[in-house]
Image: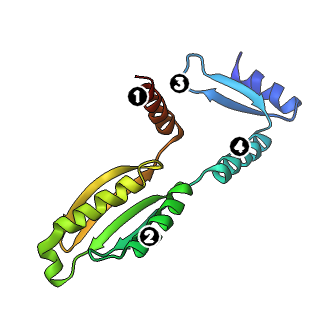
Amino acid sequence: MPVKAALEIAANRDLDLVKVQANAVPPVCKLMDYGKFRFEQSKKDKEIKKNQHIAETKEVRLSPGIGVHDFETKLKSARNFLGDSDRVKVSIRFRGREMAHTDIGRELMKKFADSCNDIASVTADAKLDGRQMIMVLSPKTKQQEGGNKNAQDKNQNA
């Protein structure tokens, strides 16, 4: 159909002529109310944005000589962050002579990761960066949790 004829039909119906596929031969066009189309698209985009959760990175700081109760408190707050679908950055700051005992910090990180193993997976292993040891935990997805349950069931049946 010639472009002039299509524009004439669009004008008669109070609609706009919109190119859907400009690269096609011949170009594909559609009659629509473009203002209404843009409004509906913006509504859809807002709805998608509203339902989207942006994962933040929360930090939990430990020290090599942390007490049992303090460790449990930090663990509880980290589990809350992971439950809210946020990543958790666990850091240990070594001061003074503590730098000679980084192995204590590594054991503490391993204990922390093992305690969160049911709801989190280690994204970045514990590594020493200057005077700080850093590890990153991410919440497990539903598929990862389901996969672990199937593996546990197989082990129990065997």
Residue 75, by quadrant, is bottom left
Q: Is mark 3 on a helix, strand or loop?
A: loop
39 is higher (above) or lower (below) than 136: above
Residue 14, by quadrant, is top right
Q: In which quarter of the image is the N terminus?
A: top right
Circle 1 packing at 10 Å, graded few (<14), some (14-19), many (20+), is few
Q: Is residue 39 visible?
A: yes
Q: Which amino acid does label 4 sit on?
A: Gln
Q: Mark 2 points at which residue?
A: 74
Q: Can residue 54 be seen in this view?
A: no
Q: Residue visible at 26% across and 74% down?
A: 64
In the image: residue 86, left or right of residue 123:
right
Q: Name the residue under label 1.
A: 155
20 is higher (above) or lower (below) than 136: above
Q: Residue visible at 54% across and 62% down?
A: 80
Residue 31 location (% of width, % of height): 77, 28
